[in-house]
Amino acid sequence: MILKRDFYNRGTIEIARDLLGKILVHKTPEGVISGRIVETEAYLQDDLACHASRGMTPRNRAMFGLPGQAYVYFIYGMYHCVNVVTQPEGIGEAVLIRAVEPVEGVELMQKKRGREDHLADGPGKLCQAFGIDKRLNAVDMTRGKFVILDGEKPEKIYSSGRIGIKNNAEKPWRFFVDSEHVSRKPR
DNA sequence: CTCTGGATTGAC
DNA sequence: TCAATCCAGAGG
C-alpha cells in the first residue's frame, strides 16, 4: 500500500523514524527498482543545517510544497540526494533518505552503479542506483512511478548525529536500523 | 559577474 | 586524507 499524504503531514522527526522499514520504489522504463529504507535524517525549518532555514530559494522550493512530494538536489558536482517533504504546504521540512537495502531490480542497480555491492548504502549511491535525479524534484510520491510503500516496522531503531553537516551536528536526528546497508559503521 | 563551499564518494 | 566536479547562493 502506498503511503498517503496524511503520513507525511506530521512531525518531521516522527516521520523520519517511521520511514525505516518502508519500501522505496522507482518504476523506471528499464524496470522496477525497490529497497527497504534503513537510514534517514530529519531536517527542520528552524535548523541551520536545513536548506530551508534561510527561506525559500529556487533550489529548495519543493521543500515548502505539499507533504509527500520529493525534494531532489544536486551536490558536490556529481551526486543527487532525495528527500520526502513533510509538514503542511508552506513549511520547509523534509526527511533525507540516506540508505536502503536493495530488494527489487538488483541487476539494474548494479548496472547503474557500475559495481556489484554497496549499491545504495549512502544518499548519493542510492540516487545513482535508483536513477533519481532532478527530473524527480517536486514529484508527488503518494502516486505514480516514484512512491514509498508501507513495510514492516523495524525491531529496533538507533539514532545519532547527522552526517556531513556543521550546524546542529550534535542533534540526534539521524535514524537507522541494524543493517549492513547503512552508510556508516555505528549500528 | 566572481567566489565559496557543500545533507558525497571512492581512491590513495 | 583528498580530489573530483559544478552549481546554488551570497556579495559586488
Image (cartoon, coloured by chain):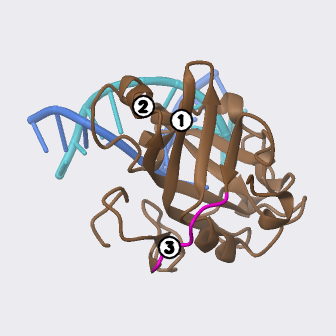
Chain colours: A brown, B blue, C cyan
The stretch drawn in magenta includes residue A154: yes
Residue drawn at x 46%, y 53% is A99
Let me know if residue A48 appears in the view: no
Let me know if residue A14 appears in the view: yes
**Secondary structure type for disc 1:** strand
**Distance of label 2 from label 3 (alpha carbons):** 24 Å
| Amino acid type of the residue that numbered disc 2 sits on in the rendered structure | Met
A98, above or below A79, in the image: below
Residue drawn at x 75%, y 57% is A3
**Secondary structure type for disc 2:** helix
Q: Position of residue A172 (x, y in %)?
A: 50, 80
**Distance of label 3 from label 1 (alpha carbons):** 21 Å
Chain where mark 1 sits: A
Q: Which quadrant of the structure image shows residue A112?
A: top left
Viewport quadrant of the N terminus of chain A: bottom right
The stretch drawn in magenta includes residue A39: no
Neighbor class of circle 1 (other Cα within 10 Å; few <14, some 14-19, many 20+) is: many
Disc assigned to residue A109: 2
Give the magenta part as a residue range. Answer: A150-155
Chain where mark 3 sits: A
Residue drawn at x 88%, y 64% is A88
- Earlier-in-chain disc, 2 versus 3: 2
Whether label 1 touches label 2, CB < 8 Å: yes
- Earlier-in-chain disc, 1 versus 2: 1
Q: Position of residue B11 (x, y in %)?
A: 16, 32
| Amino acid type of the residue that numbered disc 1 sits on in the rendered structure | Ile
Q: Which residue is mark 1?
A: A33
